[in-house]
Amino acid sequence: MVQEIDTTVPDWTSIYMEKANHENQMMLRGNVSPLELAQYISAVSNKDGGYILLGAYSEPGYGAGYEDTDPELVNEALKLVTGHNVKYQEYSPRHQRIFLFTIEKSDSIALANGSAYIMKNGIPTLISEREVLEKLGLGLDSSLINMLSDQITEQSDTVSALRKEVAEKGKLKNQISGLLVGAFIGWIFSTVLNAVFGLGA
């Protein structure tokens, strides 16, 4: 985790804005969409962890400042994040509502709306299949995964064939019991006819 931010220091937000680096200490304007915020949270978590100051900006030629941020934006974004618990605090510098997210490095994969992201050049970027596997510690390549998948499919076909055979044997078993009942009834009928008409004598 990056160095802890001391929010007890007067005007800590200005210090934060001066040191923002777009990788593990970044700022997002208060008008981002919930999905964009979720993607940033996923990306920071899947890399090394860090901080997001939501509702602050510092742009050359435009200056720096704060934007009142709707808490519903935060709530909607957090609904899209899975695989990671997000901590945040609300602050009000200069009477503007902003949020500081403290994001730990994820032990597994943090998702945003079902997809995994990682920070690349300060932008959330979808993680490739290989990166996901490496992050999960599997280290398998696609050819090995395809081979395993083919083997599982073959085994599934074998299991299906066995199930079909068992079902056919089950039908035959039911037919045998019916044939035995029919044979027994036939024997009784034959015995009765023999007794009545003396056919066997």
Image: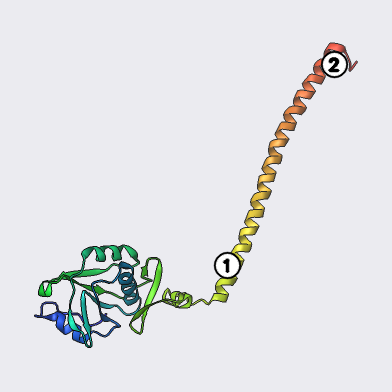
Question: Which residue is painted at 87% across and 12% down in the image?
Answer: 197
Camera sees residue 44: yes
Q: Which mark is residue 200?
A: none
Question: Which residue is painted at 15% across and 80% down in the image?
Answer: 13
Q: Is residue 194 left or right of residue 151?
A: right
Q: Using the image, determine if residue 165 lies above or below residue 139.
A: above
Lower position in the chain sequence, tag 2 or tag 1: 1
For the residues labelled 2 and 1, the Cα–Cα distance comes to 67 Å
Residue picked out by circle 2: 194
User: In the picture, which quadrant includes the N terminus?
Assistant: bottom left
Q: Residue placed farthest to the bottom in the image?
A: 60
Question: Which residue is painted at 30% across and 67% down in the image?
Answer: 34
Name the spot of residue 119 as percent of width and height, x first: 35, 80
Q: Residues within 10 Å of mark 1 (few under 14, many from 20)?
A: few
Name the residue type under label 1.
Answer: Ser
Name the spot of residue 98 as percent of width and height, x first: 18, 72
| Element class at badge 2 | helix
| Element class at badge 1 | helix
Name the residue type under label 2.
Answer: Asn
Residue in front for this viewpoint, 87 or 153: 87
Q: Quadrant of residue 194?
A: top right
Name the spot of residue 56 as percent of width and height, x first: 20, 77
Q: Quadrant of residue 65?
A: bottom left
Of tags 2 and 1, the one toward the viewer is 1
Q: Residue placed farthest to the left in the image?
A: 10
Q: Is residue 168 left or right of residue 47?
A: right
Question: Which residue is painted at 72% across and 28% down in the image?
Answer: 181
Q: Using the image, determine if residue 57 lies above or below residue 193.
A: below
User: In the picture, which quadrant includes the C terminus?
Assistant: top right
Q: Residue placed farthest to the front in the image?
A: 61
Residue picked out by circle 1: 149
Camera sees residue 106: no
